Amino acid sequence: MAKTKEKSTTKVDPKANFSKETYMFWYENMLLMRKFEEKAGQLYGQQKIRGFCHLYIGQEACAAGSVSALEEGDKYITAYRDHAHPIVLGTDPRKLMAELYGKETGVSRGKGGSMHMFDVEKGFFGGHGIVGAQVPLGAGLAFAEQYKKTGKVSITYMGDGAVRQGAFHEALNMAMTYKLPAIFVIENNGYAMGTSVQRTSNVTDLYKLGSAYEMPSFPVDAMKVEEVHKAVAEAAERARRGDGPTLLEFRTYRYKGHSMSDPAKYRTKEEVEEYKSQDPIEQVKTTILKNKFASEEELDAIGKKVKETVAECVKFAEESSYPPATDAYRDVYADPAYPFIND
């Protein structure tokens, strides 16, 4: 006689709808993003990291929920708030820290810095400093997948300020015309640099901009990683079956200023604290504990592991060398034997 399958004694929150493995993936990766960014901020204050530095603190669910919803081989592209996306995609975080330091062991060989992370092996195509310039590039990535019939999609992230650029509208128009397998994401953290959406646009529900092109467009509570996953999964399914692109407005929040040089005096402390009460990492932690996916001790062990990883990243970056002067001529042209340049 076959054994009766024992019923699970774990009470699963019906709102979860995700496995223990997914929640643990989210928690560890989001925590690593947070601690990596906090350390980057400290190092910038010590002038070990120079130039521009735009932190992702508070927005971790946007990247984590997207990656868990997509497939290996899908393509990602974003603007200059770009440290977190490659972390959750599996890029070696030591190389990301080395890039912030401008070292030759960085993902862009020390030439890109904070705004130009790049990892083709993981499907991450940057890291772009020109506002909105990545949007038509993301459409181009989708066109390539469609042309090659790979069944893969591209996902393009932009800030709320980028939707004022003509390239955004041109890309959406072309993507709908060709029914490209593309997902366009507005990471709406409320402020384009220091200017609120309300001061720059008559349309404050930014997802509605897609209606001009009859593109399926939806708002997403991006402080909840589950909502991000569901929205991206639906958009990806639509794209893979040939129904074209989707525009998603991720309603999120950054706790820090636009960049490290921004004191963020344009908003109140009360506003920041209100959003911190909805912290995406704490929400995931609460669900994990509520469903007994892990104990406090196990989560503490993950926290210790993340702290050690970040410390290793800093050590790796500080011990790495700066690129030699001759590297100024490297990677300028696709053909290394280009006749118009000499070492």
Image: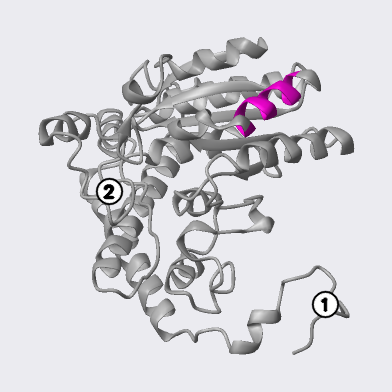
The N terminus: image quadrant: top right
Residue 290, position in %: x, y? 25, 28
With 294 as the anchor, is 16 left or right in this view?
right
Secondary element at image label 1: loop
Secondary element at image label 2: helix
Q: At label 2, which amino acid type do we have?
A: Leu
Q: Quadrant of residue 171?
A: top right
- Residue to which mark 1 is pinned: 336
- Residue to which mark 2 is pinned: 299
| Span colored in magenta | 167-176
Is residue 11 among the parts visible in the rendering? no
Residue in the image at 39% along x and 82% along y = 318
Residue in the image at 74% along x and 90% along y = 343
Q: Residues within 10 Å of mark 1 (few under 14, many from 20)?
A: few
Relative to 213, say whether 301 is above or below: below
Whether residue 296 is in magenta: the answer is no
Please tell me how many numbered marks the rendered image carries: 2
Residue 232, position in %: x, y? 56, 26
Q: Main secondary structure of the magenta part?
A: helix
Q: At label 1, which amino acid type do we have?
A: Pro
Residue 141, position in %: x, y? 74, 41
Mark 2 and mark 1 residues within 8 Å of each other at the beta carbon: no
Distance Cα–Cα, label 2 vs label 1: 49 Å
Q: Residues within 10 Å of mark 2 (few under 14, many from 20)?
A: some
- Mark nearest the camera among 2 and 1 is 1
Relative to 237, say whether 79 is above or below: below
Residue 87, position in %: x, y? 48, 54
